[in-house]
Amino acid sequence: MRVWFLDGGSILVPHASLLWNVPGADVRIPCFSVLVEHDGGLVLFDTGFDLEHTQRVLPFEQPEQTEERTIPAQLALCCCAPSDVTTLVNSHLHFDHVGGNKLVPDADVVLHEKELAQARDHEPFEYFGYSDTSWDGEGVRFDTVSGDAELVPGIRLFETPGHSVGHLSAIVGSMLFPFDVVATTRGLEREIQSGFHIDPVAGLRSIRRVKELAAEHGAEVYLSHDPDAWQSYRHAPDFYEVSA
């Protein structure tokens, strides 16, 4: 399998949002998607934020996204088009993970059944997280899961709630993606979740589960919002090659 990291730009967040209750200066964090080519087709994990929506609804996060960092442009670096994506997996439905969903309308959308229900009827404090509703358009084909699931041989999804009620993590070959279970290397090591969550107890247990999964599967953890780690990752058109 080939795995590409698609650069979707960045947003600015308070340090205490990145690491719960840990003070510090605001941090500009990356937002990226993951494209996987396997024998059955192309799987895209998350689609980043929509620039217009974020500028309008969350301007305080100072989004930065050039045309070259949109989903179509990033897919083009991998020699494919949005219409080539067969499956879109949303780790969860927060605005910075669904902004490009509408750009891959032909894909089946896989997500946790609890996440779908929560995003459609969320708590008031979750408004900004679920503020982009463009993922829920007419004709979208949702394929919901509950618990852990094998998507295709070599790609497994794991139920890791806390950041949101229906958050999913994934293992692709020997690569583990916790998505928003934990944002940074420091958070993973010290078991500190992000400042935005619905259930901190479940979130802590999910961090510990990520560690257990990494050890059990001999997998390397790739973090979605760590600016330092992001600089060390390969970015499309460069790719990783892993065994199923």
Image (cartoon, rainbow, N blue to C red):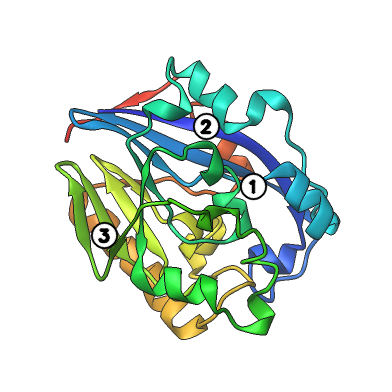
Label 1 with label 3: CB-CB less than 8 Å: no
Name the quadrant of the C terminus: top left
> Tag 2: Cα neighbours inside 10 Å, few (<14), some, or many (≥20)?
many
> In terms of image quadrants, where is residue 87?
top left
Q: What residue would you read off at disc 1?
A: 49
Q: CA distance from mark 3 to mark 2?
A: 24 Å
| Closest to the observer, 196 or 86 | 86
Q: What residue would you read off at disc 3?
A: 213
Q: For the residue marked with disc 3, what is the amino acid? A: Leu
Task: Of the two numbered discs 1 and 3 on the same chain, state the one appearing first in sequence.
Answer: 1
Rendered location of residue 29, percent (x, y): 68, 48
Q: What residue would you read off at disc 2?
A: 6
Residue 182's mark?
none
State the residue at coordinates (26%, 59%). 213
Rendered location of residue 138, percent (x, y): 49, 54
* Mark 3 or 2, closer to the camera: 2
Q: For the residue marked with disc 1, what is the amino acid? A: Phe
| Viewer can see residue 93 | yes
